[in-house]
Amino acid sequence: MTKLRYFAWVRERVGKPEEDVDLPAHVLTAGELMTWLSGRGEEYANAFTNPKIIRVAIDRSHVQPDASVAGASEIAFFPPMTGG
Amino acid sequence: MIVPTTVRLQREPFDVAAEAAKLSRGRADVGAVVTFTGICRGNEEGEPIAALTLEHYPGMAEAEIEHHVAEAIERWPLTGVTVIHRYGHIAPGEDIVMVVTTSAHRQAAFAAAEFLMDYLKTRAPFWKQVETTSGKTWVDAKATDDTAAERWRRP
């Protein structure tokens, strides 16, 4: 099981802050995971409609969409950051 | 020498003067203290705002700030660093974030404070939502913040 976490408007669109999922074997990268998620229902399609602007963190470190999800325990999706 | 560092996330307001004093009191090697405070404005792109809500990714936000504090200490001869970032509900006029850097001389303290703020804005997982009379909206990231962070990139 992998924990998926969503923040800010990604969380609002998906409709939940986190969930545990079994990643399908064909999902190898963070980008492929977004494609797979967007096929899970209207709320996911809406959240991941423009994957280019969504940032990904694997086990609390920023990664690029081509990063491998193998062995990840927590994968987070969020919009560009606006703190400070 | 171990450089004293503090990274803290909290809902409550903070006291910039008290935090700055902690890094210089009783020390004869600190010649410069730079403090930066980010404050919640009363309007966003011309529209008055009632409040801000700051969401963050607990665990990763601290780790990301700590990582950049460590980099600042490696790049400049600092004698102390404190970064405090608030989350939750923040009203116009209230403080959001503070950075204190201290050093023997001002250049290192100024540069490190600016470096930390530029990275904090683009890399630390925080998101601002503004509340106006027309509802709640998420603040868009600014390209100028990315440009500001880019200039610190080492070859």
Image: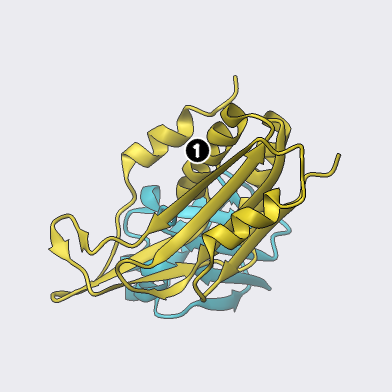
- Image quadrant holding the C terminus of chain A, namely bottom left
**Which residue is rendered at x = 69% and y = 48% of the image?**
B24
Q: Is residue B13 left or right of residue B27?
A: left
Q: Label 1: which residue?
A: B114
Colour yellow maps to chain: B
- Image quadrant holding the N terminus of chain A, namely bottom right
Q: Position of residue A61 (x, y in %)?
A: 63, 52
Tell me which corner region of the image, top left, top right, bottom left or bottom right, holds residue B139: bottom left
Q: Position of residue A45 (x, y in %)?
A: 34, 66
Q: Position of residue B30 (x, y in %)?
A: 70, 39
**Which residue is rendered at x = 73% and y = 58% of the image?**
A71
Colour cyan maps to chain: A
Q: Nearer the viewer, residue B41 or A61?
A: B41
Q: What is the chain letter for disc 1?
A: B
Image: A40 above or below A76: below
State the residue lying farthest toward the top. B155
Q: Nearer the viewer, residue A39 or B63?
A: B63
Image: A38 above or below B105: below
Q: Is residue B42 left or right of residue B144?
A: left
Tell me which corner region of the image, top left, top right, bottom left or bottom right, holds residue A23: bottom right
Image: B1 above or below B17: above
Name the residue type under label 1.
Glu
Q: Is residue B135 left or right of residue A69?
A: left
Q: Position of residue B64 (x, y in %)?
A: 62, 52
Q: Nearer the viewer, residue A35 or B87?
A: B87
One can see residue A27 in this view: no
